[in-house]
Image: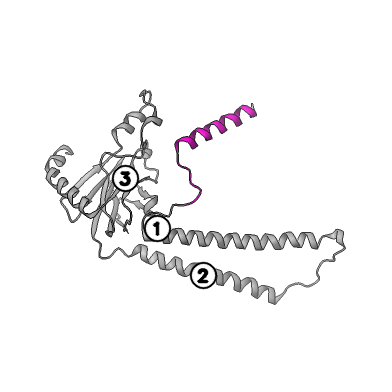
């Protein structure tokens, strides 16, 4: 029984690995701030590794060299002022070395002043609405039709045959490369969360509250995310897709959306 259960779990893990990109670390992302966040993460990780090596190294050496079988006698002193100063000063120094770059990056993350482009993001059960403040552009972004069909029970469609299953939308967010994009994030019903790993952004969408964040993408491409706040029965079916394009391509997209704005608006009533 145990053997069968083990084999089943192993098979499930192998099949999942074949259909998903596994990563043991956070992505470096496509923005300067996402790279800064990654570097801080790695700095803290290696500090923790070094502390662990030192602490456990001292413990292991002490256990081996001061064991009873070697005739070592227990210490008779009650405390050591020098040791107490050392193990107080060293952690304070380490925390300062960590806190300073973290604080600098957090200040940058919150500085959304002077954006090149502002987008109001409104969450719904279970889709996203995007409104470009400086342009006459607004649209809903929902799960793409192939994924929508495959997710239905007894649909007859193999989900593994659908490209970007549950991670594709009918209308992606389009932004120009190297533009500072400010996001004003809120919700129309319950709490959601707008999360795109490659942008290093995860902001809650809360009814009655507008959360603010920003990014400046430096690489052209398509970047995917999801709602990461349990928001109801279709929580797993409201992905996010951001397309970063060259500035000229963005202007062409804006012109095409403006031309089709009345038609799109009429179909969404």
Q: Nearer the viewer, residue 89 or 159?
A: 159
Q: Which residue in the protein does label 2 denote?
A: 97
**Residue named by callout 3:** 241
- Left-right relation of 230 to 45: left
Residue density around tag 2, few if under 14, some if 14–19, many if 20 or more, within 10 Å: few
Name the residue: 39% across, 27% down: 158
The answer to whether 50 appears left or right of 206 in the picture is right
Q: Position of residue 69 (x, y in %)?
A: 86, 58
The numbered mark, 1 or 2, whose residue comes first in the sequence reads 1
Circle 1 crowding by C-alpha within 10 Å: few under 14, some 14–19, many from 20 = many
Magenta residues, dominant SS class: helix
Position of residue 118 relative to residue 2, above or below, is below
- SS class of the residue under badge 1? helix
What range is drawn magenta here? Answer: 3-25
In the rendered image, which quarter contains the N terminus? top right
Q: Where is residue 54 shown, x and y percent of the image?
A: 66, 63
Viewer-proximal residue, 112 or 76? Answer: 112
Indicate whether residue 11 is drawn in magenta: yes
**Front: mark 1 or 2:** 1
Q: Position of residue 27 (x, y in %)?
A: 44, 52
Which residue in the protein does label 1 denote?
Answer: 34
């Amino acid at each position: 029984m145990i053997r069968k259960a083990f084999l089943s779990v192993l098979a499930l893990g192998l099949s999942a690995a074949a259909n998903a990109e596994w990563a043991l670390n956070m992505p470096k992302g496509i923005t300067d701030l996402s790279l800064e966040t990654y570097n801080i993460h790695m700095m803290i990780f290696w500090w923790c590794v070094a502390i662990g090596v030192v602490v456990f190294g001292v413990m292991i050496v002490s256990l081996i060299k001061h064991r009873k079988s070697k005739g070592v006698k227990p210490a008779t002193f009650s405390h050591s002022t020098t040791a107490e100063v050392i193990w107080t000063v060293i952690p304070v120094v380490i925390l300062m070395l960590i806190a300073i770059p973290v604080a600098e990056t957090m200040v940058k993350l919150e500085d959304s002043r002077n954006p090149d482009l502002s987008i109001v993001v409104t969450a719904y059960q279970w889709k996203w609405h995007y409104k470009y403040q400086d342009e006459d552009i607004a649209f809903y972004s929902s799960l793409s039709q192939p994924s929508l069909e495959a997710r239905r029970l007894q649909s007859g469609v193999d989900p593994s045959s659908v490209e970007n299953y549950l991670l594709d939308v009918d209308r992606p967010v389009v932004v120009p490369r190297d533009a500072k994009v400010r996001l004003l994030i809120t919700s129309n019903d319950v709490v959601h969360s707008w999360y795109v790993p490659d942008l290093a952004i995860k902001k809650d969408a809360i009814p009655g509250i507008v959360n603010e964040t920003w990014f400046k993408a430096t690489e052209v491409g398509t970047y995917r995310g999801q709602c990461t706040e349990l928001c109801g029965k279709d929580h797993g079916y409201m992905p996010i897709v951001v397309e970063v394009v060259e500035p000229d391509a963005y202007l062409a997209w804006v012109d095409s959306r403006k031309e089709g704005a009345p038609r799109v608006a009429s179909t969404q009533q």
